[in-house]
Image (spheres, grey):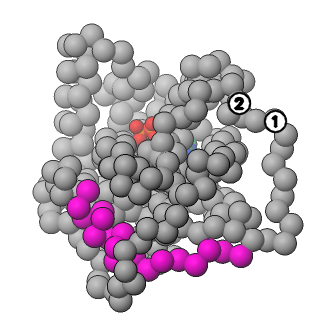
Amino acid sequence: MRLILLGPPGAGKGTQAQHLVAKYGIVQLSTGDMLRAAVKAGTPLGQKVEGIMASGALCPDDVVVSIVEERIAQPDARKGFILDGFPRTVPQAEALDRMLARHGIALDAVIELRVNEEALIRRIESRIAEMQKRGEPLRPDDNPDVLHRRLTAYREQTAPLIAYYRDHGMLRSIDGMAPIEHVADAIEEALNAAEPKPAAKPEPKPTPKPAKSVLKSAPKPAVKTTSEPVSKPASNSAPKAAAAVVPPPRPRRGRRRRE
Ligand code: ADP
């Protein structure tokens, strides 16, 4: 099972990814976690992205693409993975398509968590306030101003992926404002309804990876997951607590437990 979880900051991708990890025994690959690990470890890559991340902007596509390619080649990702926070731009999605083709693997679904942006801001702001009250450390990009920039980056650079994956017949949209368990159920329903994708044929000569590992000195990132089928145009202002949108019924081919 190979999935992408798509949605703005605070949409619940990480929470849903954890459910999926437990359920399908796949790993959650969060580029945000990988990049934060690199910053913490003070690697050259970490030093390069530290300021960018703190500002709420996106890191360069080539940097992120290289860490993902290295990560999905690791043995624990063979059974499957959930990409959380990647791709975040159309060029990243195109790079991912090429990378998967080189590895002879295919995505099963792209799950979009649709959320109401105002509710999202309130949700994140109250989470930040509660963490501050408890004296817990905050991420450098966990403050209201930077949050707005992260949401703008999502709207401008990441939301176009919704059309990209819809056009590729991969998108499943789910109401991310519903209670956590309902979102998890809707994702599962969407995955069951999704058609298994045949693995892409590997290219004749896979390009060898550059020798230098960008992940080497960083702690292994936690795996994340989440997704749901979408049959409606994505919207950042989906009505609060709307019912989960399930794609039109397709012939069922049994439960997807491809690994
Ligand atoms: P959020 O909690 O806002 O969804 P993440 O934890 O996924 O964010 O990522 C935090 C920051 O890491 C982003 O604001 C961005 O600077 C950087 N980042 C993470 N993934 C990517 C990516 N795929 N492309 C570019 N930058 C990324």
Q: Does the residue labelled 1 lie within 8 Å of ligand 1?
A: no
In the image, residue 211 above or below residue 238: above
Helix, strand or loop at label 2? It is loop
Q: What residue type is labelled 1?
A: Lys
Left or right of 87 in this view: 170: left
Helix, strand or loop at label 1? It is loop
Sort mark 1 into few (<14), some (14-19) or many (20+) by Cα contacts within 10 Å: few
Q: Which range of residues does the magenta coloring cover? A: 184-201
> Is 66 colored magenta in this rendering?
no
Q: Mark 1 points at which residue?
A: 212
Residue beneath the point at 59% across and 27% down? 219
Task: Please tell me in which quadrant of the rendered image residue 172 appears.
Answer: bottom left
Q: Mark 2 points at which residue?
A: 216
Left or right of 133 in this view: 39: right
Residue beneath the point at 49% across and 48% down? 27
Left or right of 62 in this view: 161: left
Residue 167 visible in the snapshot: no
Residue beneath the point at 19% across and 36% down? 122
Nearer to me, 48 or 33: 33
Nearer to me, 78 or 210: 78
